[in-house]
Amino acid sequence: MAKPVKKTAVRQPSSYELMGARIQKLINSPKAQQARDVTIHRLPDEPEADWARFLEEVAEAENVKIDPVGSDGVRLTWTLPAE
């Protein structure tokens, strides 16, 4: 007799994860990687709490500089760590 198939719930990504995926694409773009520079703006549908969390986490990263751009954006610049 065949075993019953368990249905697993598909977890939807959180708003923070969705925002992070969007930002990761921007940072990983060839242009941003070559320049080591990207400007990112919070989209209107992204919660301010998610944006604040992102900025706090980036501020903790070494070799990353954050400059405000307008009221809802930042310019990230980074250097590669010396090996």
Image (cartoon, grey):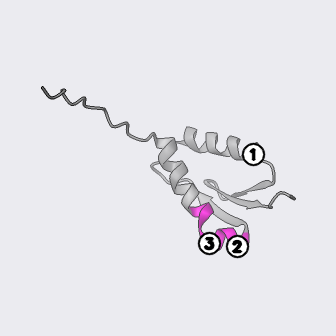
Q: Residue at x 57, y 56 (%)?
A: 24
Q: Position of residue 62 (x, y in %)?
A: 80, 49
In the rendered image, residue 5, in percent from the top left (x then y), is placed at 21, 31
How far apart marks 3 and 2 lie (CA) works out to: 6 Å
Is 2 placed above or below 81 here?
A: above
Q: Is residue 22 left or right of residue 68?
A: left
Overall secondary structure of the magenta section: helix
Between residue 54 and residue 49, name the one nearer to us: 54
Residue 23 or residue 83, whichever sits in front: 83
Magenta span has 76?
A: no
Q: CA distance from mark 1 to mark 3?
A: 23 Å
Residue at the (19%, 27%) spot, across then down: 3
Q: Secondary structure at mark 2?
A: helix
What residue is pinned by disc 1?
A: 59
Can you give x and y, in whole percent of width and height, for residue 44 in the image? 48, 52
Magenta part of the chain: 26-35
Residue 77 lies, in percent from the top left, at: 75, 61
Q: Residues within 10 Å of mark 1 (few under 14, many from 20)?
A: few
Q: Is residue 29 magenta?
A: yes
Q: Amino acid at mark 3?
A: Pro
Which label is found at residue 30?
3
Tell me whether circle 3 and circle 2 mark residues in contact (CB < 8 Å): yes
User: The residue under label 1 is which amino acid type?
Assistant: Ala
Local SS, label 3:
helix
Residue shown at 68% from the left, 68% from the top: 33
Which residue occupies 69% across, 41% down?
56
Residue on which the image places disc 2:
34
| Pointer 1 or 2: first along the chain | 2
Outermost residue, front direction?
1
